[in-house]
Amino acid sequence: MKNLILILFTTTLFSSCIDSDGLELLKLSQNINDWGEYNKGTIWVFQNDSLLSTCDTIKVSRDFNVSQGSIGDVSKIDTSINYNKEYYEWCDTYICSPLNNSNNRSFDSFIQVTGIGVISWEEEYYELEIKIPKGAFRINENGVITEKIHYYDTVIEAEKLYSYQVLGKNYNEIAHISIYPPDSDNVYQYWISKNNWIIKKLLYHNGQTYSWSVKESTIVQ
């Protein structure tokens, strides 16, 4: 009975099926989606920690839609994927700022989740002229995997935290990610919470420090 329960629990994280071509489809589970599925109506308000009177508001600009296929870049993050035998579900969530109808966006980002349990994202800050290299971490049935990832020439360190406090609020199930681009002293740190996404970011870029902490949010999943 205990073995049956374990099998059922594991398949809720990474479910799969075999198609007519004999390829195994690795489906997005609810646990994976909880890290990166955010739909229209989701809003984050970030406090600029250097200018406490200033807040930045960002929103999801397109609903979470699932696709099937394979993305070559993921093989750089998870080398276990076998493209001759497996393919997977994946989805991008697009985020932008400001919240109004202006075409002059100050910030763009997208989150990508895959059926093999890789969560990745990119960010670009137009006014600051900062484009962050791709960040990524992996999850399994035990949550965030603590490891060092080599993504092309970028080094990504992922650390599992059980909780983290931001502006007096406690968040659980945290991925602490540090991104080290090549040939640079720049370091980009993120604290990401399951069902909340980024709750704090600390960017060391060209000798300057930029820090934001989530002040409030409305999450639609």
Image (spheres, rainbow, N blue to C red):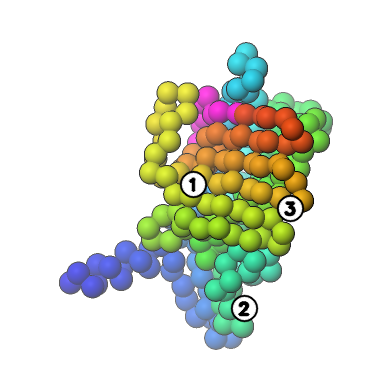
Q: Amino acid at mark 1?
A: Ala
What residue is pinned by disc 3?
182
- Label whose residue precedes the other's in the sequence (3 or 1): 1
Q: Which residue is mark 2?
A: 83
Q: Which image quadrant for residue 113?
A: bottom right
Residue at the spot 55% in from the left edge and 46% down from the top edge: 177
Above or below: residue 107 compared with residue 134: above
Query: Looking at the image, which residue is at 53% across and 64% down?
Result: 115
| Front tag of 3 and 1 | 3
Amino acid, disc 2: Tyr
Q: Residue at x 60, y 63 (%)?
A: 77
What residue range appears in magenta? 212-221
The residues tagged by marks 1 and 2 sit, at their Cα atoms, a distance apart of 27 Å
Quadrant location of residue 174? top left
User: Disc 3 or disc 2, which is closer to the eye?
Assistant: 3
- Seen in the picture, residue 140 relative to 4 is either above or below; the reply is above
Q: Secondary structure at mark 2?
A: loop
Residue with the mark numbered 1: 175
What's the residue type where badge 3 is placed? Pro
Residue 109 lies, in percent from the top left, at 68, 43
Q: Name which of mark 3 and mark 2 comes first in the sequence.
A: 2
